[in-house]
Image (cartoon, coloured by chain):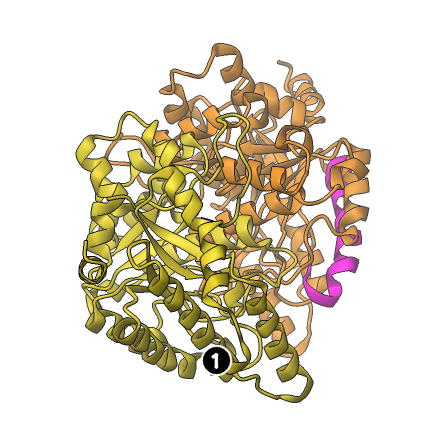
Chain colours: A orange, B yellow
Amino acid sequence: MLIDCHGHFTTAPPALGEWRERQIRAFEESGARISPDELRISDDELRTAIEQGQLKLQRERGVDIALFSPGAGKMAHHYGDADTSLSWAHVSNDLISRVCGLFPDRFVGVCQLPQSPGDALALSVRRSAVELERCVEELGFVGCLLNPDPSDGYYEAPPLTDRVYYPLYEKMVELDVPAMIHVAMSRNPSLQGTCAHYLAGDTAVFMQLCLSDLFTDFPTLRFIIPHGGGAVPYHWGRYRGVMQDQGRPPLEELVLRNVFFDTCVYHKRGLELLTDVIPARNILFASEMIGAVRGVDPETGHRFDDTKYLLDSIESLSEDDRRAVYGGNALRVFGRLEGVLREAAKESGN
Amino acid sequence: MLIDCHGHFTTAPPALGEWRERQIRAFEESGARISPDELRISDDELRTAIEQGQLKLQRERGVDIALFSPGAGKMAHHYGDADTSLSWAHVSNDLISRVCGLFPDRFVGVCQLPQSPGDALALSVRRSAVELERCVEELGFVGCLLNPDPSDGYYEAPPLTDRVYYPLYEKMVELDVPAMIHVAMSRNPSLQGTCAHYLAGDTAVFMQLCLSDLFTDFPTLRFIIPHGGGAVPYHWGRYRGVMQDQGRPPLEELVLRNVFFDTCVYHKRGLELLTDVIPARNILFASEMIGAVRGVDPETGHRFDDTKYLLDSIESLSEDDRRAVYGGNALRVFGRLEGVLREAAKESGN
């Protein structure tokens, strides 16, 4: 089974973005709230968006299941206040839930959290635990996106290892769901989004984890660091060396029981490095589809984000390792995924 | 000739750090200034620091020349005001100049700039041009360190492609000297220095350059992005794809005439990727010595930062490419280096 652990609903009907714009504008102009009920998107619109977008590409590439979350950049947690983020998370997650309901054997939900920066951080983390529970228990989701920089480009929040985040981690452990670490948009003109802020966030959080004892407090907590782990595998020697200089345990003990990398690296050479340096049990297939890069690579004739094609061409990956990367690891890291898929199969009579 | 383009005086006698602490404290407490004349370091102290530190390692590894700059983290441009940074740059650069004078056939200077964040940015850039000219014309330096984040961890400055930086670029072009892009310390608890902020800064600046037409305005401007280019070579496909999606020219045209990467990547697998993905003419040998990682890699028995050992073991590098990476490119990118070395040889009678 080929499981893409990193898909976003970037093709949502325009009404979603329009609702969000009204929400932001109303709050900025007068502190007013826009009701989620004002958003109207029909099932047919959702079906079209998915069938002409993600599902078409999944079929072409042989992807069976996508773990599907709201557009990451669009989470944009810095707008408005904690209630703004809460309402936006409800709207976004409910829409993902509808997609998963329409295509139950193709999409499984991963939720956006109602995070907020600054003084609202602690409240927003507690509410994130509540929203996570709602999405998992009521909507059948299997994980969440956790934004390490709700200031959206200025890195003003404490590290993800700070105790302010513990209420969320307690809930994640209780529910047996992991988080994909994923920054949202950048409003910082010095940090472009997909090619700077995303990779910087991935890299920063890995080092936060290396320097903390978070996994002593939460031995079963699990994080996926997307985009191939940012700069981390390329600089694996630097991390090994600095941890050794500081008298910390080896990375295998320190983080690799709890931290996983996805395969969103858009050239064969990069994926070769990832699969050579990082143990196969820590790598999860993903394409970030439909996302950062949309064109066809003239060097291969395949889309840049067709990581299935790229991984298939890497001969050094053993068959066992390939099975783990393509799906086995996802079933292990997303502890509830197998049960959710079993339910979906039962309901559809397969 | 083996030229290390990235060495820092991290082993400076303690008096330097003590002067800096007094400078910061005096300004914070009462706005007072500490005179550079209060710093006393003897030639013998400098000789000992270098001979037991950088020079010892250079001899062991066969490094002929190091391009030598003040400790990058210690630039710490956010402290005090523009005058604080100016005085600190004078002190730091004058000390580098003394080291180069004591070991003229071993060290060539690269200067720290008197940058400052916030309202002082524009003034500090104009003063940086003046300090660069002093260091190049009077002290025989061949390049500078340019900090893309003088806020030290919050990325509050405009991108390096902003016109506020043009006075410095005009001077760099006039003097025919490149800049190594190098952030300083991080005062942000979410962004550790050497393994997060450094790599994030490298990555962010590469994308700033990709999105601008800076090199149309300055066709001969040259930047070295250190630490193997941050996350960039590992994600080369992502950059190629996003530039293509945006209708921008290929990276070779867009940036590779002006942007170079150093080899501060501390494992063989990473350096293989760098040398496979990036044209050899864009790679400059470097070790970041004595810097981020100081221990011995138990997997190789060599120090993590012994990039000479690692590069020697990469068989796919042709002899021509190896010569370019080990020294030829440095002589080309640092346009004044050959002249400075010739002068040094003449004076020492070699």
Residue beneath label 1, please? B87
Horizontal side of residue A62 vs A206, given as left or right? left
Q: Main secondary structure of the magenta part?
A: helix
- Which chain is disc 1 placed on? B
Give the SS element for disc 1: helix
Stretch in magenta? A116-138
Horizontal side of residue A249 vs A11, given as left or right? right
Residue at 54 percent across and 43 percent down: it is: B294
Q: Picture quarter containing residue A5?
A: top right
Q: Picture quarter containing residue B141?
A: bottom left
The three-letter code of the residue at mark 1 reads Ser
Horizontal side of residue B191 vs B342, given as left or right? right
Residue at 35 percent across and 41 percent down: it is: B236
- Where is residue B283 drawn, in percent x and y? 28, 45
- Where is residue B156 drawn, in percent x and y? 51, 70
B93 and A319: which is toward the camera? B93
Quarter of the picture containing the N terminus of chain B is: top left
- Where is residue B225 drawn, in percent x and y? 36, 53
- Where is residue A76 drawn, in percent x and y? 58, 58
